[in-house]
Amino acid sequence: MNVLKLNETNEFNAGQMKRFFLVEDSPFFKIINFNLDAGVTFPVHSHDLDGELSILVLEGEGFFLGEDNMEIQAREGDILRSQIREPHGVRAASKMRILVTIAPPI
């Protein structure tokens, strides 16, 4: 058992996305914290394997993105769940922190 301290990953780079691998050595899942500066897009992408992912908005707001220019409003506390094969991405309207969980890890 261990505790991950998300307040220690509250860093932003101007005009960029910053990534913190919180759990990457588990055979069962991966947890990544992404911090997106306002206006930054985490491009829509997918992975050619079976599994699921979740994207939790820790702070800020923006949009969950999908195929065919789909956008879903994303605010603090919202969580997106999808298949890893399903196209997904995020665009930050303000400084935005998201927590991505992937199972099994890729």
Image (spheres, rainbow, N blue to C red):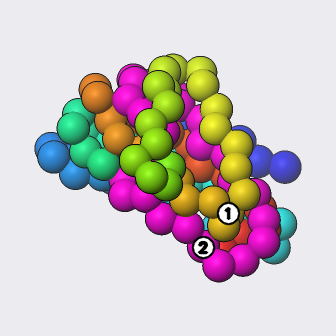
Check the image and report above or below for 45 versus 72. Answer: below
Q: Which residue is mark 2?
A: 47
Residue occupying the point 60% across, 43% down = 55
Residue 44 in sight here: yes
Residue 65: mark: none
Q: Residue at x 35, y 41 (%)?
A: 91
Residue 91 is left or right of residue 15, and the answer is: right
Q: Position of residue 54 (x, y in %)?
A: 67, 46
Q: Disc 1 marks which residue?
A: 84
Amino acid marked by disc 1: Ile
Q: Please state the extent of the stretch shown in magenta in the rendering.
A: 42-65
11 vs 9, left or right, is left
Q: Amino acid at mark 2?
A: His
In percent of width and height, residue 26 lies at: 77, 69
**Image coords of residue 84 (percent x, y):** 67, 63
In this orientation, which residue lies closer to the viewer: 19 or 49?
A: 49
